[in-house]
Image (spheres, rainbow, N blue to C red):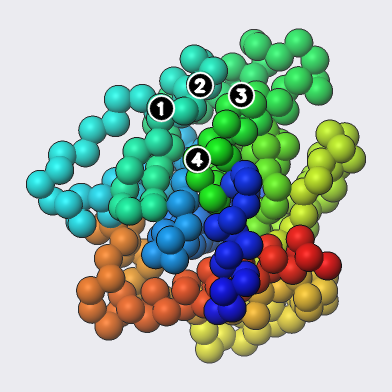
Amino acid sequence: MKDIFLNNLLNRKKGLVITVGNYKGGAGKTSNSILIAYQLSKLGVSTLVVDLDPQTNATKALLLTKSANDPDNINTVDKTIMYGVASKNFRDLPVKILSNLYLLPSFTDFQDFPKYVYQHANTTYDEALILRPLIEPLKDTFDVILLDVPPMSKEVTENAVVASDYTLISFQTQERSLTGAENYISDLLKYKDAYMLDIDILGILPVLQNKNGSVDKAMLDAAKSAFGWDLIFKTVIPHMERIKRFDITGITDRDRFDKKVMEKYKSVTEELIQRIYESEND
């Protein structure tokens, strides 16, 4: 990877916020969020994963990662993201997972976020501005902040997009995921106009269901036709069982199966960093 791309990320005055989205569940959003974050941290990029999903999959996987690398350290989380929303402060919430890798943890109580939005926002416009003032101060501490959002929550998605500089779309090669990506982009454009956002799409990251499947190839071609070749990541994530195992064990980098996953996500992360540079230097 060219040093110029990485230095562009490391030498910013403020960090970047990237939402990883798609309206379809099971599109690989959480796996992509945590594994890209892991690779960024290995490159020396101070990275924060914000878990905006009450199912807490990113929280569980990253806390397991912390335990796997420091088994003597007992994982305790005193304050979660909903506590931060209610207290209007995220600064003391991030939990250190590894060197350069932090987590803003979620809990099932985050399912109350939509209720909080409608109780505390005076106008429709204000409903989308709950998270942005809480995330903005974190840009002074972290180089990259990745927002992992649930598949279908208008309130969370709208707040995440409004707080973001970029979005990365996770796309599993199936029809519903393609439709989810199309609808997500459609709403993204609406939010961009309504809130005068300076947000760009970094790209669409394909995740194959079957690396040798004809359906996967057809869906990948359909995505390229729908969104344009330039928007599709050159690096494609093949079907790898080891990725699912990380939900149980945490992220590990020990055997050849781990290393296969790490090599692929290293390529994804390098392409992501290059896309950020190219977006800012066109």
Q: Earlier in the sequence, mark 1 or mark 3?
A: 1
Callout 4–callout 2 Cβ contact below 8 Å:
no
Q: Earlier in the sequence, mark 2 or mark 3?
A: 2
Marker disc for residue 89: 2
Q: Report the amino acid beneath label 1.
A: Asp
Callout 2–callout 1 Cβ contact below 8 Å:
yes
Q: Which residue is mark 4?
A: 141
Nearer the camera: disc 1 or disc 4: 4
Circle 4 Cα neighbour tier, 10 Å, few/some/many (<14 / 14–19 / ≥20): some
Q: Which residue is mark 3?
A: 114
Q: Report the amino acid beneath label 4.
A: Thr
Residue at position x 39%, y 52% from top?
100
Q: Secondary structure at mark 2?
A: loop
Rendered location of residue 177, percent (x, y): 65, 61
Q: Which residue is mark 1?
A: 92
Residue at position x 76%, y 20% from top?
126
Q: Secondary structure at mark 1?
A: loop
Rendered location of residue 54, percent (x, y): 46, 35
Q: Secondary structure at mark 4?
A: loop
Nearer the camera: disc 4 or disc 2: 4
